[in-house]
């Protein structure tokens, strides 16, 4: 746990606004989480899937009362907007890129929650400096998300500005996947990426696009591989480097930084390596899986 409170501007994040009378109903039938639960007091983490239940885009959903706002990776924004536009049909909604209105920050470590005026309740949301702040709905350790009007000064808060690498290293060591580097469009299944434990799925909301496969993989326990963090002894392997268990290819490296990375690995191989103490390799480096407490498999 970091003793000091830090913040970093997330330059690679954008915001898509969904406005209009049907905005809640429209998104509710498409995304993995319960849009009806989003309010001035609550934000959620969610994903848009293919009809076959494979990952496309992940994002946070919050509201400014008049609009639903989807905060996503900048590389996702255009594709996400186009995909939602396809399903708009006669719904009374408008989709607008409002990224120029906002700056997006992450705050983490120390007493960050109380400094922003929040408790440690996942997804808890409040107005902050004319914008919105919410506890990261995925994990308490990831701190808070702060979305402010463009060029707003954070003020005299006791926050230490840090480098984006500090935040990325925290995310990687916690094993929280990044939608652009760790999850693969039209391939990854949500449960492989820990979406259930990271509160990105509402199992009671009813139908949404890709819901059938998502439910089937949960209730039939069909997941054979998982994204999880590892510690690396040796050079950091490049993204896509195969993971070897003896002469078997059992996964691959995804995002990494310093001596840590997130990998996709077969669950049986992870369990066998722990049980027998056998080494798992990626290139010339030894990797040691670090299953986190929040992971349930």
Image: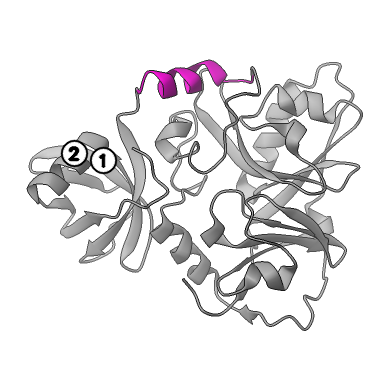
In the image: residue 250, left or right of residue 51: left
**Pointers 1 and 2 in contact (C-beta within 8 Å):** yes
Q: Is residue 278 above or below residue 21?
A: below
Q: Is residue 239 visible?
A: no
In the image: residue 187, left or right of residue 230: right
Q: Nearer the viewer, residue 179 or 128?
A: 128
Q: Is residue 32 above or below residue 273?
A: above
**Residue 130 lies within the magenta run:** no
Name the residue beneath numbered marker 2: 269
Q: Nearer the viewer, residue 232 or 268?
A: 268
Please rate how many residues cluster around mark 1, counting C-alpha atoms within 10 Å: few if below 14, some from 14 to 19, many from 20: many
Name the residue beneath numbered marker 1: 251
Instruction: Write the residue at 65% across / 18% down.
Output: 206
In the image: residue 280, left or right of residue 88: left
**Residue 220 lies within the magenta run:** yes
Judging from the image, what secondary structure is the residue with disc 1 in?
Answer: strand
Residue 262, given in percent of the width and then of the height, sits at: 36, 52
- Magenta region, residue range: 208-221
Which comes sooner in the sequence, label 1 or label 2?
A: 1
Instruction: Write the residue at 28% across / 58% down.
Output: 237
Q: Nearer the viewer, residue 55 or 74?
A: 55
Q: How many numbered discs, if any?
A: 2
């Amino acid at each position: 746990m970091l003793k000091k409170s830090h913040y970093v501007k997330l330059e690679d994040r954008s915001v898509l606004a969904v406005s209009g009378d049907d905005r809640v109903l429209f998104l509710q039938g498409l995304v993995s989480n319960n849009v009806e639960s989003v309010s001035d007091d609550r934000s959620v983490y969610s994903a848009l899937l293919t009809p076959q239940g494979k990952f496309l885009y992940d994002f946070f959903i919050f509201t400014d009362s008049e609009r639903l706002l989807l905060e996503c990776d900048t590389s996702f924004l255009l594709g996400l907007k186009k995909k939602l536009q396809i399903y708009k049909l006669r719904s009374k909604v408008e989709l607008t890129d409002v990224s120029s209105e906002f700056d997006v920050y992450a705050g983490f470590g120390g007493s960050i929650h109380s400094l922003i005026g929040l408790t440690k309740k996942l997804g808890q949301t409040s107005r902050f400096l004319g914008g919105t702040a919410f506890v990261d709905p995925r994990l308490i350790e990831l701190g808070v998300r702060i979305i402010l009007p463009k060029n707003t000064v954070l003020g005299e808060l006791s926050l230490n500005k840090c480098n984006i690498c500090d935040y990325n290293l925290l995310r990687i060591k916690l094993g929280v996947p990044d939608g652009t580097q760790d999850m693969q469009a039209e391939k990854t299944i949500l449960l492989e990426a820990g979406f259930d434990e990271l509160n990105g799925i509402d199992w009671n909301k009813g139908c949404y696009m890709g819901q059938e496969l998502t439910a089937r993989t949960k209730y039939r326990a069909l997941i054979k591989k998982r994204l999880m963090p590892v510690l690396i002894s040796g050079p950091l392997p490049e993204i896509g480097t195969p993971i070897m268990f003896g002469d078997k290819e059992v996964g691959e490296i995804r995002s990494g930084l310093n001596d840590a990375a997130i990998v996709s690995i077969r669950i049986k191989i992870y369990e066998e390596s722990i049980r027998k103490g056998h080494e798992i390799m990626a290139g010339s480096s030894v990797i040691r899986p670090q299953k986190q407490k929040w992971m349930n498999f």
